[in-house]
Amino acid sequence: MNTLRYILLERLYEWSKIPYRFLFKKEAPWDISVKDLLKYPLESLGYHLGCFLLQHHFTPEPQLEDHDIYHVLTGSGITVPDEIAMQFYLFGNGKRSMYLFMVLTLGTFLFPDHIKQFWNAYKKGRKAHAFYHLNFLKLLQQPLTKLQYTFKITTL
């Protein structure tokens, strides 16, 4: 059962991201590669995003680039419970969407053994200044630590 809950949420994410992108994401894709991101200054958000993507063998998901930025800003991991915790962080930060509520509901139901992790993430999100709505494409040159300090973002 332990493995089944991981597989279930991973499959739901894979199946849902295309309709989610089509129905809810109206902004244009960034059209940027990992190679492009790694050309940014070493301390920049863009460079750290490139490192995150390279480290996990990811490529930027068109119109979903903000999701990986949230990982970089909050220092969250990529396991299923870490992904859910990051959504709790964003909920605490003020983000509201049907997709987020579905993740919170399913995550809480399937991972009750991680509720303390989720609660701690939520509290950290509440303490941070709202950042979930920023245009991160325009902030890729900014130093990561400066953004974290300015928005009081503490890592998970």
Image: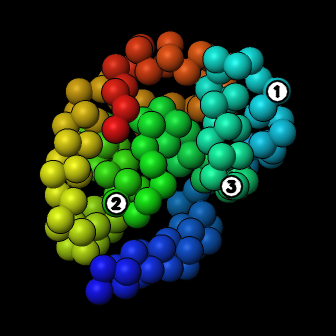
**Disc ID at residue 39:** 1
Q: Secondary structure at mark 3?
A: loop
Separation of marks 2 and 1 at Cα, in angstroms: 32 Å
Residue 112 screen position, x and y as percent: 17, 67
Vertical placement of 46 versus 29: above or below? above
| 32 lies left or right of 60 | right
Q: Quadrant of residue 152?
A: top left
Q: Nearer the viewer, residue 144 or 25?
A: 144
Q: Amino acid at mark 2?
A: Pro
Q: Secondary structure at mark 1?
A: loop
Residue bearing mark 2 = 81
Separation of marks 1 and 3 at Cα, in angstroms: 17 Å
- The answer to whether the residue labelled 2 contacts the one labelled 3, judged by CB atoms less than 8 Å apart, is no
Q: Residue at x 74, y 18 (%)?
A: 41
The answer to whether residue 120 is seen in the rendering is: yes
Q: Amino acid at mark 3?
A: Phe
Q: Quadrant of the C terminus?
A: top left
Q: Nearer the viewer, residue 24 or 105?
A: 105
Residue bearing mark 3 = 58
Q: Quadrant of residue 141?
A: top right
- The answer to whether the residue labelled 1 contacts the one labelled 3, judged by CB atoms less than 8 Å apart, is no
**Earlier-in-chain disc, 1 versus 3:** 1
Within 10 angstroms of label 3, few (less than 14), some, or many (20 or more) residues? few
Separation of marks 2 and 3 at Cα, in angstroms: 19 Å
